[in-house]
Image: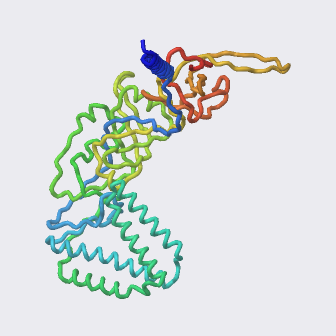
Amino acid sequence: MDKLLLRRILVAVLSFLAVIYAVYLLVSANFNMLPTENAVEVTVTDTVYSDGYIIRDETYVKNNTSGILSYSLNDGDAVRVGGEIAKVFSNEDDAAAQTKADELEKKLNSLHSLQSSFAKNTTDIDTINNDINTNILSMLNNMNNGEVGNVNNYINNLVSSINQRQVYTGKVTDFNTAIAQLQTQINDLRGSSGSSIGTILSEKAGYFSAHCDGYENSIKSIDVDKIKIDDLDNVSRKSVEKNVAGKIVSSMGWYVACVVSADDATRLSLWDGAATVKLLNVYSESIPASIERIYQENDNSDAVVILKCNYMNSNLIDARKEPVEIGLGNYKGLRISKKAIHDDYVTKVTYDENDNMHTETSKVQGVYVLYGSEVQFKQIVILYANQDYVICDKAPDSKLLFNGETVSLYDQVIIEGDDLYDGKVIQ
């Protein structure tokens, strides 16, 4: 055989063997690799989800005068006994003109007040700038939360603060021209349209809403201690009479009634701290709440839960049947996958007064952590658990740890693997 051909065959065989060996090393390494996840710090809220029914003390506002209503209040606005709810006009043109004149009156009064305060020199530039920033942030926050009823108030306050800054910085000397123009517009609107022919006043103090859904007082607040599941299933809607102009929510306290599973009822009954409620479709913020009542026919049945809230705004005043999220507290710690948890033995070393070493061994719950190529077992102290993961205390009381060691932030926690044990070296 030709020597050159033999050499080529030998090189090809050696190259093939080298490739096979490299593939073997790669496959071996991959088989020895253990899937891990970093222990990261998170904050979670223990939550219970359900469908809620909103119960309030509600009284219909009646309008016994024929005509066009122009409301003086926005939904969610507070009103006192005898406070004005709406004015009644003969036609829509009069209502529109007089309502516009009322809005201009507010701007006129704002300019008068601003000019008076500037003459007294009672405000400094830092206060003005803070007011501008506060109104901008409040307006954006209300818009993000869907509280559109309050946006106009913040816009008016913002415009007033900007005008105040204009005067303070010398860009304008007074508002005499603007005041005169506003007064002219108001006089024209008042003179060219008819005045109101009636006024609707509130018979109760509380919060106003022009919207009525027919569920008002279907379940009364005084009956929350008697509610059962059937009561919520059979709640009925009634027709609203044509002369109803809105309603007054006469108590700041209102209730959320919902049905939960037996397991969730147990969680709620064991919770002794403050709770929160989110009405997921109408308001994004958590509302402080207290658990007033949990009722079950038996230990294995679903339960009625009654929560009480004392916060009201334009979004919440018209909520009735809403998906709810009940929050039972926040837990901050290290997030660990449940499939990473094992039971294993750890050893504690102590020394007596004669400096003699003693060892104790105990079986504890923990995770295997990869340090380089070595596996170490670390005990965990669980603060919170759900179906997929647990939240572990990153700095638990030493009394809770057998040998003082626990999982640390960014540890590589092994989530799968066979024949794991403390001190094992991964080849």
| Image coords of residue 317 (percent x, y) | 32, 52
Residue in the image at 17% along x and 62% along y: 64
| Image coords of residue 420 (percent x, y) | 55, 17
Farthest residue in the top direction? 1
Name above or below for residue 322 compared with residue 352: below
The reply to whether residue 179 is in sight is: yes
| Image coords of residue 7 (percent x, y) | 46, 18
The reply to whether residue 20 is in sight is: no
Residue closest to the eye, 426 or 364? 426
Residue closest to the eye, 155 or 12? 12
| Image coords of residue 183 (percent x, y) | 30, 84
Residue in the image at 37% along x and 78% along y: 109
Left or right: 196 in relation to 229: left
Q: In which quarter of the image is residue 208?
A: bottom left
Left or right: 359 in relation to 177: right
Name above or below for residue 85 compared with residue 258: below
Farthest residue in the right direction? 354
Residue closest to the eye, 159 or 209? 159
